[in-house]
Image: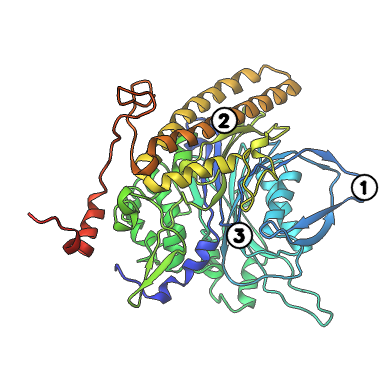
Amino acid sequence: MKRFVAAMLLGMASAGAMACTNLIVTRGASTGACNMSTYAADSHQLYGELKYVPAKDWEKGSMRDIYDWDSGKFLGQIPQVEHTYSVIGNMNEHQLVIGETTFGGREFIDTAAVLDYGSLIYLALERCKTAREAIVLIDNLMQTYGYASEGESFTLCDPNEIWIMEIIGKNPSYDRKGRNVNRGAVWVAKRIPDGYISGHANQSRITTVDFDDPENCMYSKDVIRHAREQGIFSGTDAEFSFCDVYNPLDFGAARGCEARVWSFFNRFADGMDEYLDYAMGYDLKKHMPLCVKPNRKISQKDLADMMRDHFEGTPMDMTTDIGAGGSHLPYRWRPMEFEYNGWSYVNERAIATQQTGWWFVAQTFRDSETGVFWFGVDDAATSPLMPFFSCAESVPECLQEGNGSLIEYSETSMYWAVSRIAQFAYLRYDRIGAEVRSIIDDYERDVMANVEKTLANVGKMAAGERGKYLDRYSAENACSLFDRWQKLDRYLLVKYMDGNIKQQNPDGSFMTNGYSDRIPEFPIQEDYSDKWKENVVRDNGDVLRIPN
């Protein structure tokens, strides 16, 4: 089972291109009595910046320009509504949060459609108060203006409910005038029961449709009929499974996608060993559940740390084989597979990944008018989260749109400050990465406790005062953290340059040699891992061996 032919890896290429993760914790499963959801925008072409759209009233007849979220291509226009809500990142002023992962699926794409998946997300955030409203709106928009993207899974989270909605465009069919008479998409949405956790990661996960349970399941009326018309399903309605019909599972989708959800379930729920072979792509027959009941309550810090997961302690742990190098690096550079001597092999895809543009952990509260949008940029494992609030009115300079890009370095950008440290940490991950993580943990424990106290205090303020106070709090925290991360960058370079580790005094200052304050004590020079030494000796030991 350790070797895989190339045919089994066909799904890995798409999994690498569509690499995002959503994790879900319902109110009854959280320590803070809140619904929580996460999202990592994992793309080799996405830059870490924080989007903000203020609330606005629009004149009658106004139009909304639509641009493809991934490419920036102009797709068309749709009528604007009378009033749009404010949006910070992926959370609006009513605490509605929407995340996504792309699963691709059947190649049904309407090239003349106006709305891509990203536009649907932000249109729903600008126009809806609840997850249910957003599902209805997304359906109406797709059927009216067409759906221009591949298969998508959406997480829709509000203070009361969390839903997963999975959609795929209908197979276009054009009449003599070139009009698509099969416009729109088919979809199904399921509510995650309170007290449970769920997630999705670039693979459709919804199976059966609960036709007689509108409180917990919604769907397009032609979701089965369209499959029959396309010749991809011929069973009874009761046998219909959305993911099996529209996004059939293969090895790559299990190992590169479902394995991430399994790792989340495995961390917080019992009995997940039963699905290990499924997650590893060895046994695809037994579907992993859409949601599971955790064995303990989950905090926002627990969830943030889950977004930093590298399969630690599982057979897919990347720190234990020679691919980790001499410093236990839990990453493999892309592509997601490699070939050697006619066999194809996997480069694992964990939740935490080097190509993250930005990520978040969102908290929505029934008993508060303010949700918390914890936002980070670049790789989650080396990225600190910054609190913003659903009543936000601005974004600090270090996170503003347009402050740098992936091809334009900016000295004032949080993304570049975080990325510099991540790149350095990859060189000596067991030491530099561990130190960065320790600093992140200390900071996040403090700021999360402080935000909890702050929310309790602002509840006594007037609504106008509350928004301004929280806006100022977010800006001051982000600016302070940006300054701290710039100093951390310089400190790490001084401490770890040239593969050495400078010795430090109890107060953190660097030791001198006792004669000059400009010359350090002789540095620590740590060994490589035993796995690395074993393989070096096997490869070149005859040349490197020191004679007795």
Residue at image point 48% right, 69% down: 11
On the rendered structure, is 498 left or right of 465?
left
Distance, label 3 to label 2, CA atoms, is 38 Å
Residue 323 sits above or below residue 427 on the image? below
Residue at image point 27% right, 41% down: 526
- Where does label 2 land, which residue? 483
Pointer 3 or 2: first along the chain: 3
- Where does label 1 land, which residue? 60
Whole-percent x and y of residue 536? 24, 59
Query: In the depicted view, which residue is nearer to us: 288 or 511?
Result: 511
Q: Kindly state the secondary structure of the residue where label 1 is placed.
A: loop
Do tag 1 and tag 2 residues touch (Cβ < 8 Å)? Answer: no
- Where does label 3 land, which residue? 152
Distance, label 1 to label 2, CA atoms, is 45 Å
Q: Is residue 334 visible?
A: yes
Residue at image point 47% right, 47% down: 423
